[in-house]
């Protein structure tokens, strides 16, 4: 009987289940001191092939050309005709309206409605993001803004999983519009453009 009790004790001692409960691992959105960017979540390695949505267009999906921020908008944009990225007319208006909507939802709380870095969260103590009117940002390639939206920068986290690639480009186009409209003097406008200004702008 004594031997049976010893055997039962040994068997029970071997039944403790650790599984992966105590194994070192990173939880979603957990910071990491191991990687230089401080994030435990890693982007796909270059050349990785998606199992569901194949994204081979580096310019459209990552804002990069030869692994550097692109200086141009993508050569196509998801429209009914899958046409080139619009530069004028109703189609450009549609993209800019979409960009403004998405900017207001995801960006304005920090960057401010005009991109001056004085959003409502900043007024409550959040770190001040740079104004889009700084020379280094006014001259930055469009791919820089896309990459920042995609991967985050500084205190700003990634929006790549929240905003579609098409909407990221729409936001970039809207940011460029904010930069141009605020950097252009009234005297440089045509008479018809001056007539469309609000009284405050005049």
Image (spheres, rainbow, N blue to C red):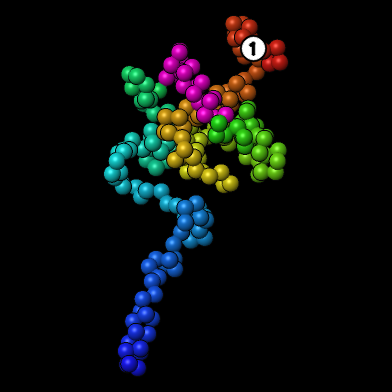
The residue lying toward the viewer, choosing from 82 and 47, is 82
> In the image, residue 140 lies at what x, y percent?
52, 34
Q: Can residue 64 be seen? A: no
> In the image, residue 165 lies at what x, y percent?
42, 33
Going 34% across and 19% down the picture, which residue do you hit?
80
On-image quarter of the N terminus? bottom left
Label 1 sits on a secondary structure element that is loop
Magenta residues span 86-104
On-image quarter of the C terminus? top right
Q: Which residue is mark 1?
A: 197
Is 99 one of the magenta-colored residues? yes
Q: Quadrant of residue 12?
A: bottom left
| Neighbourhood count class around disc 1 (C-alpha, 10 Å): few under 14, some 14–19, many 20 upward | few
Q: Is 122 situated left or right of 33 in this image?
A: right
Q: Is 122 situated left or right of 144 in this image?
A: right
- Say if 13 sits above or below 1 in the image: above
As drawn, the residue found furthest toward the bottom would be 2
Q: Quadrant of residue 195?
A: top right
Q: Can residue 91 be seen? A: yes
């Amino acid at each position: 009987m004594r031997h049976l009790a010893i055997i039962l004790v040994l068997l029970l001692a071997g039944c403790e289940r650790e599984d992966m409960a105590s194994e070192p691992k990173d939880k979603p959105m957990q910071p990491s001191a191991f990687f230089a960017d401080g994030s435990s979540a890693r982007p796909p390695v270059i050349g990785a092939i998606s199992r569901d949505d194949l994204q081979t267009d580096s310019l459209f999906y990552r804002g990069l050309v030869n692994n550097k921020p692109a200086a141009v908008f993508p050569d196509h944009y998801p429209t009914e005709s899958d046409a080139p990225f619009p530069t004028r007319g109703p189609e450009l208006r549609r993209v800019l309206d979409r960009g403004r909507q998405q900017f207001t939802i995801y960006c304005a709380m920090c960057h401010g409605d005009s991109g001056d870095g004085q959003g409502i969260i900043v007024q409550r103590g959040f770190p001040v993001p740079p104004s889009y009117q700084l020379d280094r940002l006014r001259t930055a390639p469009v791919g820089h803004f896309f990459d920042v939206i995609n991967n985050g920068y500084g205190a700003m986290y990634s929006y790549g999983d929240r905003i579609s690639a098409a909407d990221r480009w729409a936001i970039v186009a809207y940011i460029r519009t904010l930069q141009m409209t605020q950097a252009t003097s009234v005297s440089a406008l045509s008479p018809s453009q001056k007539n469309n200004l609000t009284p405050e702008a005049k």
